[in-house]
Amino acid sequence: MTTKTLSPATPSLRPATAADLPRVQALLTENKLPLDGVDRALECFVVAEHEGALVGVAGTERCGVGEHALLRSVAVADAWKGKGLGRALVTRAIADAESRGAKALYLLTTTAEHYFPSFGFRQTERALVPADVRESVEFASACPASAVVMVREHAGTKATAPGDAT
């Protein structure tokens, strides 16, 4: 008789709740990501859960009146890295931001600038980032000035640079 090894079930994705905050913060800390502003943006986060454990998170933070958003706090538990969970979380976070009206999504990264182009992000200059995004806690103080800035425009739109006519 042989024993069949079953592959682990896929984590379920769901919107984050206030009760998830301590586990989200723990996962972000494990992944050396900033916690600044997470509590205020948690309503726009998605989490991955497996057997009661929080194993992944990705969030967006609305900026200004909502035309721009910041993709932030993408983290996956070590046991789930390399299994497509990060891709599922980022895809869901992008879709959620766009469903809330975001026409451009920005991000800052010190380690993953080669990962995000597969989602339609491209590098941009800090000076071209709209003021409402630059004023976010993550952009203004939580991430180092050396972080790479990237942007993804919603299909059919083009992000405007500061001073551009609309």
Image: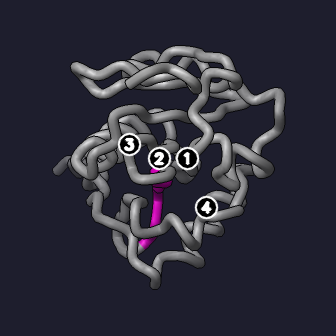
Q: Name the residue under label 1.
A: 72
N-terminal of the two: label 4 or label 2? 4
First along the sequence among labels 3 and 2: 3
Task: Examine the structure image and report whether residue 61 is included in the region drawn in magenta.
Answer: yes
Badge 1 or badge 4: first in the primary sequence: 4
Residue at left offset 69%, top offset 28%: 111
Who's the residue at 54% across and 76% down the image? 21
Q: Is residue 28 left or right of residue 91?
A: right
According to the picture, the residue beneath numbered tag 3 turns out to be 67
Q: Which amino acid does label 3 sit on?
A: Glu
Q: Is residue 110 above or below residue 21?
A: above
Nearer the camera: disc 1 or disc 3? 3
Q: Which mark is residue 127?
A: none
Q: Mark 4 points at which residue?
A: 27
Using residue 71 as the reference point, say whether residue 22 is left or right of it. Answer: right
Tell me, yes or no, whether the highlighted magenta stretch contains residue 92: no
Disc 1 crowd, CA 10 A, few/some/many (<14, 14-19, 20+):
many
Task: Find residue 49 and report its image quarter.
Answer: bottom left
Colour setup of the view:
one colour
Kindly check if marks 3 and 2 are in contact, taking CB atoms under 8 A apart as contact. no
